[in-house]
Amino acid sequence: MTEHSKHSAPERNPLTAPAGTPHGLPPFDRIRIADYEPAIDDALAEARREVAAITGNPEAPTFANTVVALERSGTALDNIAEIFFALHSAETSPEMDEAAERIEAKLVAYANDVNLDPALFARIEAVYRNRDSYGLDAKDAMLLERTYRGFVRGGAGLADDAKARYRDLTQELSALSLRFDRNVLDATNAFTLHIAPEEADRLAGLPDFVLESMQAEAAARGEEGWTVTLHAANYIPFLTYSADRELKERLWRAYNTRCIGNHDNRQTVLRMVELRRKLARLFGYRDYASYVLEERMAGSEETVQAFLTRLLDATRQRALDEVAMLERYAREQLYDADFRLMPWDWAYVAERYKQSHYALSNEEIKPFLELESVKQGIFRLAERLYGLRFEANPAIPVYHPDVTAYEAYEADGRFLGVLYMDFFPRATKKGGAWMTNYRPMYTTADGQEIRPAVTLCGNFTKPTPSTPSLLTFDELETFLHEFGHCLHGLLAEGRYASQTGTSVYRDFVELPSQLMENWASEKEFLDLFARHYRTGEKMPQKLIDKIAAARNYLAAYANVRQLGFGMTDMAWHTLTADDTLPDDVITFEQAAAEPARVLPLIDGTAMSPAFTHIFAGGYAAGYYGYKWAEVLEADAFALFRERGIFNREVAASFRRNILAKGGSEHPMTLYVRFRGHRPDPQALIDKILK
């Protein structure tokens, strides 16, 4: 996507004119940043006309002329907004950041105008009161229920003065969320650790693939020597392999003080927490978590707190034992009797211990996990499970040279959708890995099925002039995780965009993704693709056995660490009107996460100012959902283990009851239909402690 200084003429705007691209996909090669706002403005006007036609309909309100009509209104607006915000994460710029603030403000204003429209709500309420008279099937009944509840939770039942406050709160929250996200990216990009040629002795112990990546990063910046950034593909390998504790401490502190000081987000955190608390109070909830969790699988704050506590009580001592084990090993084998294991030492000591006790290291694994081979292996997994086929189509426009577009097909040739893959870090791309939609699956009023377009974004190690992109085992799991989300989008079936694909409860959406991670250590899966990138040698059984043996290595520590994140999230969002808002983000977070702390506390550091999941990513009062979904996936994968990891019958049931259904029914109903019983947290506890 390139920029242009002038607005395109409306009739030539590639976002609103017929695209002429395969499957009607976005013409990324023709879209300019200046095209978005005119397209959004046109689509907003169209959406407003569509809503006005509903409220102005002289006929009595019915499910079809009110609820379905509303669901199908604003389709053009939704499609353009999906494109814009997906690209805002993957290929942004200062101009796009500025446009995002203006566009988001317009979209929130429109959403509020719809949700707070008394005439529209009166029609919806009338349909809801008479819902038993329509003979609705499960999908239609869910659409009506979610539409009605969405309006109530969106302020439709508030008094006029409260509606005005609701508008102000949501507008400000939206703007703050964008600012928070932009600050995190800017802070991540702002720091580099450069090692000059005369300091080469500080590189001792770093494997070639790390050195090559650091050299490439330096060269890209016009520097000699080696450069490390705070992007995961640079940051994690350096902490894992560098023996230089001083450099690692500097790097770790930089990462864990992002948006504290420069690009500071602390006041933004406090303001967002206060605004969310006020929003919850408008609706009579004691805190924001209670407001959010009413629409989650867990159902209540009490359930979430009990869930986190149960997992923590069951695994914390094991996590402390793991920390003590590594510290003891480091004192005996790496340092001296006075050594104290610090957070910046963790990755290095953990890797050295793994090499020593499991004879396993990422250096040994990476040559067998060449990115292209991994991708083909994951495609073959989708074929074995679901009969899918993926074909690259260079005729589909993409937004960056790193991106490849694939068409997904059923075994019988039915077209399912398009998958964009975007693997490598760059300054214009946010960190981490994610899946999102460019277009969801839905059915038009005249019965035409619109198939989805989804994207898988990562920040994997870039290839160098001498070495292709080689993945760590963690990156293999990340790839599988995001691909699981993509399958959820691609295999969607249904009528309504608000119900298909990943449009499900937040604490259910991670089930398909976390389930996929289980295949990473399975021999039958690795045999499909894991070949040495130079020799073509198949990953040896001995190495696979070591991977399997180490599968549970430090599992309790990883679990407790995640619980600490969930507890921090809940602490912020269970502040009530009677609680004094903290004046120091760092102190508050440290107290909230203390029960899950198993490594030394480092003053002045905190994750909240860069915790995009809960302050810019939709997981507020929902981060526990990752652990909740782990309970589901531990129980679900047990069925695959029992009947075979490629069992088509189990896969077909998972597809039919989970992936295809989206949010058309309550997730517990869908899960029980697939598994035959409700999930039990003990399944995850047993998996961690085995």
Image: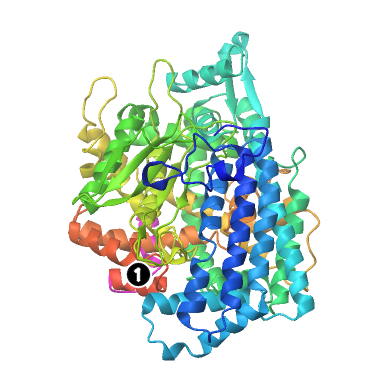
Quick check: 221 above or below 323?
above
Q: How many marks?
A: 1
Q: Position of residue 165 (x, y in %)?
A: 77, 70
In terms of depth relative to the viewer, which is nearer, 137 or 551? 137
Residue at the image point whose x is 67% and y is 81% from the top:
157
In terms of depth relative to the viewer, which is nearer, 533 or 600? 533
Residue found farthest to the top: 198
Quick check: 689 above or below 544?
below
Q: Is residue 63 left or right of residue 196?
A: left
Q: Is residue 635 magenta?
A: no
Q: Residues within 10 Å of mark 1 (few under 14, many from 20)?
A: many
Q: Is residue 241 left or right of residue 550?
A: right
In terms of depth relative to the viewer, which is nearer, 608 or 11? 11
Q: Position of residue 570 (x, y in %)?
A: 62, 63
Answer yes or no: is residue 85 visible.
yes
What residue did someone put label 1 on?
A: 671
Q: Is residue 677 magenta?
A: yes
Q: Position of residue 669 (x, y in %)?
A: 36, 75
Q: Which residues are magenta?
A: 675-690
Answer yes or no: is residue 205 visible.
no
Identify the element where label 1 is drawn: helix
**Quadrant of the drawing holding the C terminus:** bottom left
Quick check: 226 above or below 268?
above
Q: Is residue 292 left or right of residue 375?
A: right
Q: Position of residue 560 (x, y in %)?
A: 51, 54
Q: Tell me which corner region of the image, top left, top right, bottom left or bottom right, holds residue 202.
A: top right
Q: Amino acid at mark 1?
A: Tyr
Residue at the image point whose x is 46% and y is 51% from the top:
437
**Quadrant of the drawing holding the N terminus:** top right
Q: Tell me which corner region of the image, top left, top right, bottom left or bottom right, holds residue 244.
A: top right
